[in-house]
Amino acid sequence: MFTQLRENLRRRANEPQGYRYILRVGLPLVAGMASSTVMQFTDRLFLSRYSMDAIAAALPASIASLTITLTLMGVCGYTSVLIAQYVGSKAPGRVGSALWQGLWFSLFSTLLLCLTWWPAEWIFSLAGHANSVRPLEVSYFRVLNLGAGFSLAGAAMAGFFSGRGKTRPVMIANMAAALINVPLDYLLIFGGFGIPPLGIVGAGVATVIGWIVCAIILACVIFTKENDAVYHVRKGFRPEWDMLRRLLRFGLPSGVNFFVELIAITWFSFEVGVFGTQALAASNIAFSLNSLAFMPMLGLNIALASLVGQAMGRGRPDEAERVTMHTLHLAFAYMLPMAAFFVLAAGPLMDIFIPGGMSPEAFAPVRELGIVLLYFIAIYSLADAGNIVFFAALKGAGDTLGVMYLLLGGLVLLLILPIVLLKALGLASVISYWSVFTVYVVLLAVGAMLRFYRRGWHRIRVVETAPGGGE
């Protein structure tokens, strides 16, 4: 039996669209996302040691910022799918134009993000969080949004590499950003070398500097004479309205999808925050640990969307299905041990976040609740593997509108309405809310799988050079 299993794995590894093919493209992106995860994790870790209020403010503020930024990034980052489909349909000269439309949109988005400075206080006043937490949320939100334009430009430029399946430069850029960000994070939060302790504002500034470093590295590698000769990365700088329309048609629903996913977590975090700072801190720490499992898998998500895009550009949906199934196997191979890790090491993981100056006894309520929440994460992280894979495949095929409807329906019917009902029945608690959230993630995975197997995405054409002629 074991010999047959080994042979089966070897066959799946080496066949077209097999494990080796996926990992060659996906592992650098996983490593890049892992470095981004390290940035976020150390950011939260340092803030938890700085003060309880700082860690309580960090997640709601960063998620509120991401809710806006990732909506715009859905458009900027969709350059990867356009580029993948142009490469698959053997039209490399169209790659530069697709890239530049993403960059032009990132410039426009930067202006929009700067305008969020003024409504920030009003946004966080709606949450009803403690008065000691709210100013920190506002400050962190403002700093992140002022610098997020560099992250958007970086996402558009990363699409040049992921869309072509040449992902190592993205890994290098992200790892370089992390290497600079982590020590800078500590320095700016706690102070040193003549710099006063800036707390949560310092954490935001360090993050923005990391985004700037990443964008500069990618730009230096992209805009060369060699790339211009093949992909027209300089010649294609002009706005091209048909290409921009194509980017918006498929990218905007993708951006809304990011918005819906983040608004779900944002709204959920705000609702949990009503139970007090300890409950909010426990949830924030649990979500931060969850990012250890989730964020690296986004590398596989990006890789799969590009590989499906290339297959659809060639007019081969059968190849798209094969690479999706193999990616699902790899996602489960990662998520299963991560789920076991969250269960077996829940206590020690929570102990990492004891704030400086706080006794273990004072931290005990946060620790005990956080352990239970990690059990919930262990359960739904397995379903999240399906979400990551099936949503990526549908995105790469251009079915972003269908995914948008699925996510919107799930948000309202599976998350918001059940929590409202719990409140009306007097059953509201941190545990009941997290139970609802877990069911929400699991049922979303079921919906994504069913939509994938309906195969309506076989008929979608994202680019005009694909077999079947355009859209």
Image: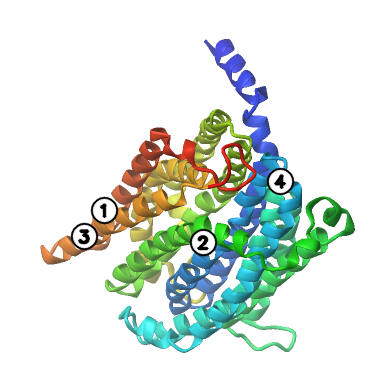
Residues at marks 1 and 3, CA–CA distance in whole angstroms: 7 Å
Image coordinates for residue 451, horizontal then vertical, percent: 38, 39
Label whose residue precedes the other's in the sequence (1 or 4):
4
Which of the numbered marks, if any, corresponds to residue 164?
Answer: 4
Mark 2 or mark 4, whichever is nearer to me: 4
Which of the numbered marks, if any, corresponds to residue 414?
Answer: 1
193 or 134, which lies in front?
A: 134
Residues at marks 2 and 4, CA–CA distance in whole angstroms: 40 Å
Image vertical order of residue 154 relative to residue 166, above or below: below
Q: Secondary structure at mark 1?
A: helix
Q: Label 3 crowding class (10 Å Cα cut-off): few <14, some 14-19, many 20+?
A: some
Q: Secondary structure at mark 2?
A: loop
Disc 2 designates what residue? 352
Label whose residue precedes the other's in the sequence (1 or 2):
2
Dividing the picture into quarters, in which one does residue 469 lie?
A: top right
271 or 448, which lies in front?
A: 448
Image coordinates for residue 21, horizontal then vertical, percent: 67, 33
Whether residues under marks 1 and 4 lie with C-beta atoms below 8 angstroms apart, the answer is no
- Residue type at tag 4: Arg
Which of the numbered marks, if any, corresponds to residue 417?
Answer: 3
Which of the numbered marks, if any, corresponds to residue 448?
Answer: none
Whether residues under marks 1 and 3 lie with C-beta atoms below 8 angstroms apart, the answer is yes
Mark 1 or mark 4, whichever is nearer to me: 4
